[in-house]
Image: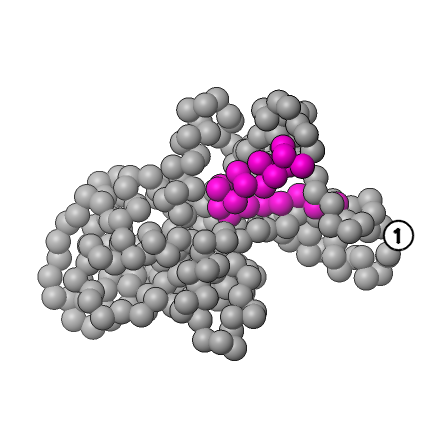
Amino acid sequence: MQALKLNNSLGKGVNVMIGNRKILKRQRVNNLGMLRNTVNFFFWKKKYHERPISEKLNIVPVFILTNHNNSPYIFHENDTQVCYLFLCPYDAENALNEIVKNNGIKNKNNVKIHNISMEKAYELVREYLFLKNMEKRNEDGRKNNVYWKLIPSKRQMENALIFLPYKKKSTLLFPVFYIEGFYIRKDTKNIIPLFFDMEDLKEAIEKTPMKNYEIKVLNFIDVIFSDNHSSFGFIPSAKSLAYMEKLKKIGVRNIYTV
């Protein structure tokens, strides 16, 4: 088992553990793939494995579209009003361009992309599931409700289908990627990092001595709504983090409050 330091910003350090038996050697690295000093682990004040799932999701960005009033842009699915929560900012961009094209919007700035945390998105998805349950009891309330719908990354869905057995492909909703035996050591516990971007996982693992490994896929929704998430941590997409910085530079508020 090998321990790798992620970067100097982690205080006493967070180790990446490979294997599960013997410590072969210990070396320090400044960067581990997409973790290039972009993920701030200082908010892990409690022991990480004791933190609620909502707090673990705080570092993961999600992207929404807003209208000229800076209100969430509402889509219509049959008789249902829906606001989309995009895991991939470029999928959000494509949706924005379709809105501009199909509605003849001359000023593209009337529709904008903002980001919120996955922690907030988690609350909105829980609200969505609650409203869906209420719909079964009160059909008249459907038209007045606005639902929040999480939209998976198209690219990562395609990546995930490569690694899933045929029987599981139809049940996949929101993929996250991991490798057995690849851990982050935090607060004396081995935490399994779940990557939202398969390319980030590959880049991270290439900086370790692991040669024979198998990429596996979990359904993100199953993880966050399970009671067994203490051993998991989430690694946001490097592309999403970079896009957040892009929004910040052009003057879009870094965190949008829904």
Q: Where is residue 251 in the image (x, y as percent from the top left)?
A: 48, 22
Q: Residue at (67%, 37%) from the top-left corner?
A: 102
Q: Where is residue 72 in the image (x, y as percent from the top left)?
A: 66, 35
Rendered-image quadrant of the C terminus: top right
Judged by its main secondary structure, the magenta piece is helix
Q: Position of residue 49 (x, y in %)?
A: 40, 58
Read off the residue under disc 1: 140
On whether residue 93 falls in the magenta region, the answer is yes
Q: Can residue 230 be seen in this view?
A: no
Up/down of 215 relative to 236, above or below: below
Which type of secondary structure does the marked residue at label 1 adopt? helix
Instruction: Give the extent of the magenta segment.
Output: 81-102
Locate residue 62 relative to residue 73 in the image: left or right: left
Give, as a three-letter code, the residue at label 1. Asp
On whether residue 88 falls in the magenta region, the answer is yes
Q: Can residue 101 be seen in this view?
A: yes
Q: Where is residue 144 in the image (x, y as percent from the top left)?
A: 82, 44
Locate residue 5 relative to residue 171 in the image: left or right: left
Residue density around tag 1, few if under 14, some if 14–19, many if 20 or more, within 10 Å: few
Q: Residue at (88%, 52%) from the top-left corner?
A: 140
Up/down of 95 relative to 51, above or below: above
Q: Which of 108 and 84 is in front in this view?
A: 108
In the rendered image, which quarter is residue 19 located in?
bottom left
In the rendered image, which quarter is residue 146 located in?
top right
Q: Residue at (61%, 30%) from the top-left corner?
A: 111
